[in-house]
Image (tube, rainbow, N blue to C red):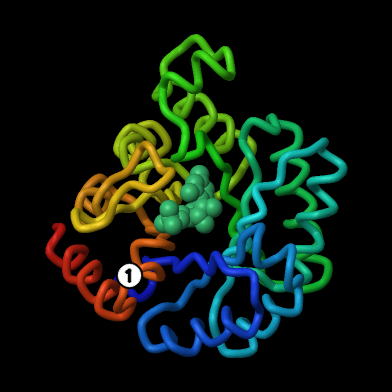
Amino acid sequence: MSKERIILALDVSDADYALELVDRFSDHIEIFKVGLELFSSAGPSVVRSIQDRGKKVFLDLKLHDIPNTVARAAIAATRLGVFMFNIHASSGFEAMRRCRDSVVELCLKENLNRPKILGVTVLTSLGQNTLKEELGIQHSLRTHVRQLSSLAMKAGLDGVIASGHEVSMIRNYCGKNFLIATPGIRPSWRPPDDQKRTMTPREAIREGADYLVIGRSILSQPDPLKALDLITIEMLTAK
Ligand code: C5P
């Protein structure tokens, strides 16, 4: 179960190292996340190499642009064959809708697998104060996450990325089929780093997250496979 639900964030810049990690975790992880750092340095070829190994890729580029541009990027990601990608929900309804419609149309026309599209709500590195004081958003963080989640749902996205603290609220509001991927996961033995809205693996699963996106709590540990083992045990004992 945890094999399908932990997404390992390959937050490295070297393609060879990234692929070494994929091989090392191959028996334990099905979905690997390629984010801004790895994609900017190694490009689509690293995504293909991961997929050639029989693994799925979550392309975490957090698209945030005008509707035409995000829709075209979404088409490129779909042709690349990724399992999942994301767009900032604050790009607005039209951008998300165009993204989804272009992907659906392309997949029907070219008989491709349709990637799951998730909306990024509020980054887990942001807290209530940052939202208010830096971004000028006056309502509460939870209200903001709820608003962005319901906008993503209305636009036809498959789900959202949100911190563990908002999972049950989103679940109640958007229903059980709406996917929720949760970063900011910190077991009790790992400091929060730059993340603010953190949660342990056990709590996040209890709250109802479908996927846990985990990077440093595994990869920066002295024994990463052991760290994954501990996290897996926590998840299995969550229910
Ligand atoms: O190392 P750590 O587990 O904090 O990494 C979390 C990963 O999840 C990072 O790759 C980060 O880019 C990603 N992420 C996030 N918050 C989001 C979406 C993605 O932290 N809202």
Residue 175 in the figure: left or right of residue 74: left
131 lies left or right of 66: left
Residue 141 visible in the shown view: yes
Between 143 and 44, the one nearer to me in the picture:
44
Query: Of 207 and 9, which appears nearest the observer?
Result: 9
Quadrant in the picture for the C terminus: bottom left
| Image point (42%, 51%), residue name | 183
Q: Position of residue 22 (x, y in %)?
A: 51, 83
Mark 1 vs ligand 1: CB below 8 Å: no
Q: Left or right: where does residue 114 sit relative to residue 74?
A: left
Q: Is residue 42 above or below residue 25?
A: above
Q: Position of residue 100 (x, y in %)?
A: 71, 48
The amino acid type found where label 1 is placed reads Gln
Residue 6 at x, y percent in the picture: 38, 67
Q: Which residue is mark 1?
A: 221
**Residue 112 position (above or below residue 212):** below
166 or 44, nearer to the observer: 44
Where residue 75 sits, quadrant-wise, is bottom right
**Dot 1: element:** loop
User: Can the viewer see residue 1?
Assistant: no
Q: Residue at x 27, y 50 (%)?
A: 204
Q: Residue at 36% across / 37% down in the picture?
A: 197
Where, quadrant-wise, is the N terminus in this rendering?
bottom left
Q: Position of residue 214 (x, y in %)?
A: 40, 61
Q: Residue at the location (55% across, 75% down)?
A: 56
Q: Residue 166 sits in which quadrant? A: top left
- Looking at this view, name the residue that lies furthest to the front: 222
Q: Image quarter for residue 45?
A: bottom right
Question: Vertically, is 128 above or below 7?
Answer: above
Q: Residues within 10 Å of mark 1 (few under 14, many from 20)?
A: some
Q: Viewed as shown, does residue 216 lie left or right of 36?
A: left
